[in-house]
Image (tube, rainbow, N blue to C red):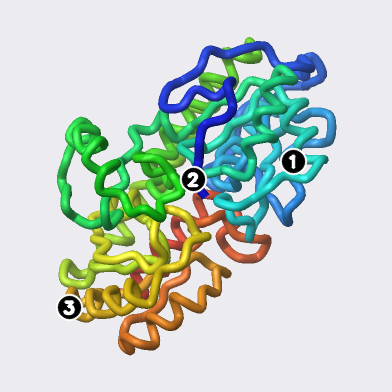
């Protein structure tokens, strides 16, 4: 499934000019003071979109649970509402929206999408929302995205600056595995809490420009500071992992940002490409098992609830490499301890540190 940008209103890789929303919902909103903490915001449950405020007060929609959680902190701070289209357990690579969710996107002032080819199943819905007058913003292109490499997250370019990473983008496009569903840039930006802190600022500023309410920018700055603290907490937890226990194999190429931000190395990927809907050949699996043994990989990462038989087969074949389940595809359901983006990132750090120390 190769992504091709088919939505004229979405500008890939740069901020698009803001346009008035279709319904002017801000006239309906009652605004209150800021006060959300780092764990505040939306915690969607199930496939249907869920809101952080009463029905009729929704000012913005996010596609993924991670963006929805951060957006929920911002709108809660201002006293308005937001919706996350996806819920816990939804895979953003193959998610498709219900008619109700399509209507929610079309009726919102703004829709925040991850972009960079992540939400291929939502292209038609986003196109319809843009045609109805909603402003669409792709967040990932705003966050200095990393290039895909032949083995994503591998320390081939460790220590590079963002500018040096950008210089390798063309090279990465040529080296990318044929099974990649995304373009030359990696869409999995949420695996770096520092980048999501930047996302909060971007979203707050754009909501302020769109609605004319400056408190969105102020609250975006507050959430940015909260998530910067989360970033530091994650870094401190992962710093406990010994230097000789930091080599990972992942279920799919979604952990480049985690590795780059927190000093880890990915030596192999089970499922080819940046999506979860590809399958490796028997030859690729055999080569990966050999690579894991040769590199001395310390853990095999997979997404909570993925239940990949391929991942389990690789782990069984290798024998002594633990399988660590992280909240990668989305935040967790109620009672999981990972119900917000901030909680999910701390959960992930602790799970990984516990497995490797």
Q: Give x and y (percent) for residue 100.
A: 82, 40
Residue at left offset 38%, top offset 69%: 270
Which one is closest to the eye, mark 1 or mark 2? 2
Residue at left offset 69%, top offset 50%: 44
Residue at left offset 54%, top offset 19%: 206
Q: Is residue 14 above or below residue 254?
A: above
Which quarter of the figure has residue 50?
Answer: top right
Q: Earlier in the sequence, mark 3 or mark 2?
A: 2
- Disc 3 on helix, strand or loop? helix
Task: Point out which mark residue 51 bears.
Answer: 1
Q: Give x and y (percent) for residue 244.
A: 16, 71
Residue at left offset 61%, top offset 65%: 336
- Disc 2 on helix, strand or loop? loop
Q: Mark 3 sits on what residue?
A: 294
Gap in Å between the C-alphas at discs 1 and 3? 48 Å
Task: Point out which mark residue 2 bears.
Answer: 2
- Say if mark 1 contacts mark 3, CB within 8 Å: no
Q: Earlier in the sequence, mark 1 or mark 2?
A: 2
Gap in Å between the C-alphas at discs 1 and 2? 32 Å
Q: Is residue 92 above or below residue 54?
A: below
Which quarter of the figure has residue 9?
Answer: top right
Q: Nearer the viewer, residue 338 or 23?
A: 23
Q: Give x and y (percent) for residue 232.
A: 33, 48
């Amino acid at each position: 499934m190769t992504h091709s940008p088919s939505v004229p209103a979405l500008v890939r890789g740069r901020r698009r000019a803001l346009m008035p929303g279709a319904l002017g919902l801000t006239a309906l909103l009652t605004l209150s003071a800021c006060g959300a903490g780092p764990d505040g915001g939306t915690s969607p449950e199930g496939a249907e979109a869920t809101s952080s405020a009463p029905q009729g007060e929704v000012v913005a929609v996010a596609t993924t649970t991670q963006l929805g959680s951060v957006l929920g902190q911002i709108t809660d701070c201002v006293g308005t509402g937001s919706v996350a289209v996806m819920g816990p357990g939804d895979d953003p690579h193959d998610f498709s929206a219900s008619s109700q969710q399509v209507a929610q996107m079309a009726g919102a002032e703004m829709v925040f999408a991850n972009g960079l080819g992540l939400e291929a199943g939502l292209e038609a819905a986003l196109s319809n929302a843009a045609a109805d007058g909603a402003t669409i913003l792709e967040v990932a292109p705003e966050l200095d995205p990393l290039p895909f490499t032949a083995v994503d997250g591998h320390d081939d370019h460790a220590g590079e600056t963002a500018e040096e990473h950008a210089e390798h983008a063309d090279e990465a496009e040529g080296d990318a595995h044929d099974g990649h569903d995304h373009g030359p840039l990696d869409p999995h930006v949420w695996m770096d809490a520092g980048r999501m802190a930047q996302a909060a600022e971007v979203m707050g500023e754009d909501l302020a420009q769109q609605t004319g309410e400056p408190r969105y920018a102020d609250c975006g700055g507050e959430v940015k500071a909260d998530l910067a603290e989360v970033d530091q907490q994650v870094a401190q937890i992962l710093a406990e992992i010994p230097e000789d226990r930091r080599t990972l194999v992942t279920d799919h190429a979604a952990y480049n940002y985690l590795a780059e931000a927190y000093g880890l190395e990915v030596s192999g990927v089970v499922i080819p490409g940046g999506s979860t809907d590809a399958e490796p050949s028997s030859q690729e699996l055999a080569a990966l098992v050999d690579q894991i043994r040769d590199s001395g990989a310390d853990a095999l990462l997979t997404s909570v609830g993925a239940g990949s038989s391929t991942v389990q087969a690789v782990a069984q074949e290798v024998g002594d490499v633990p399988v660590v389940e992280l909240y990668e595809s989305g935040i967790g359901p109620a009672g999981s301890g990972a119900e917000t983006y901030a909680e999910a990132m701390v959960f992930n750090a602790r799970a990984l540190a516990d497995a490797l120390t």
